[in-house]
Image: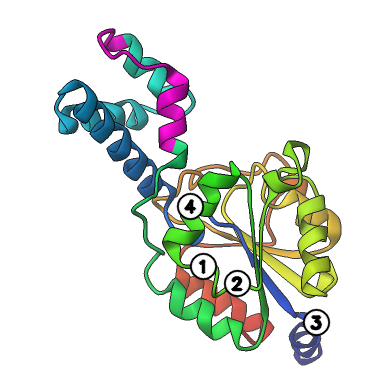
Amino acid sequence: MIILYLWMKEKLKAILFDLDDTLYLEKDFVKSGFKAVASFIQNDNGINEEVVYDRLCSIFNSGERKNIFDYYINEFEEINYSINELVNLYRTHSPNIKLIPGIKEYLLSLSKEYKLGIITDGYIQTQKNKINALGLNNIFDQILITEELGRKFWKPSIVPFSTICDKLGVIPTDAIYIADNPKKDFKGPNQLGMDSMRLRLRDGEHYRSEPSNKGFAPAIDVYSLDNLKIEMNRYNV
């Protein structure tokens, strides 16, 4: 056990994080985007902002994820906007979001000893707006939005993981990836021999999701930041 612990301590050089539902709650971005859209509709049409916002939230809470604005426009035909206009506003707004409690302090402590990186899927401007709102540029050594490499290199591709490791000057087996979504986040690290950990927050979008097979499964699940810190002590973090 002591030999294993020292080996782990020696090899870990970089800690990589997902963004959405790992460093902040994605539902907060969704609410922020709905507020931006509702405010726009009210200012342009005089329809009460809270009514619009509540209806968008109701559609979202019903389980719909991909066609929320389609549903809304179909319900209110007097809204004279295209779906693309509302989607673009949602994606490009400056979000009102915050890091999960305690994570900033933890990241700053990690940055003193380890190289830190972010690998996140999503539209470039949307993800950049989130990163700016959360103040992450000055904490992380490398931030990779997979769309910058091309849509075919979104997770679960191994390319973003190998790319960020190259930029950080480490090999994949020297790193660990902390993320939330078993549908895509852990297959790439597994293929590269990189350790992985799933931060399974109760308010996260993928809290109840399970990996389809072992290839998509993380090495370990944790359920809170405190739990994450305890498990990371295996690496002397």
Q: Are marks 3 and 4 in contact (CB under 8 Å)?
A: no
Q: Name the residue under label 2.
A: 140
As drawn, the label of residue 11 is 3
The answer to which quarter of the image holds residue 102 is bottom left
Q: Residue 5 appears at what percent x and percent y?
A: 74, 87
The reply to whether residue 214 is visible in this rendering is no
Compared with 132, 157 (above or below) is above
Q: What stretch is highlighted in magenta?
A: 75-90
Q: In which quarter of the image is residue 59?
A: top left
The answer to the question of whether label 1 and label 2 lie on touching residues, with beta carbons closer than 8 A, is yes
Instruction: Name which residue lies at 32% across and 42% down.
Output: 31
**Res 162 quadrant in image:** bottom right
Give the labeled residue for mark 4.
129
Q: Which of 114 and 182 is in front in this view?
A: 114
Q: Dot 1 corresponds to which residue?
A: 136
Does the stretch in magenta take in 80?
yes
Going by the numbered disc 1, the residue's amino acid type is: Leu
- 4 is higher (above) or lower (below) than 225: below
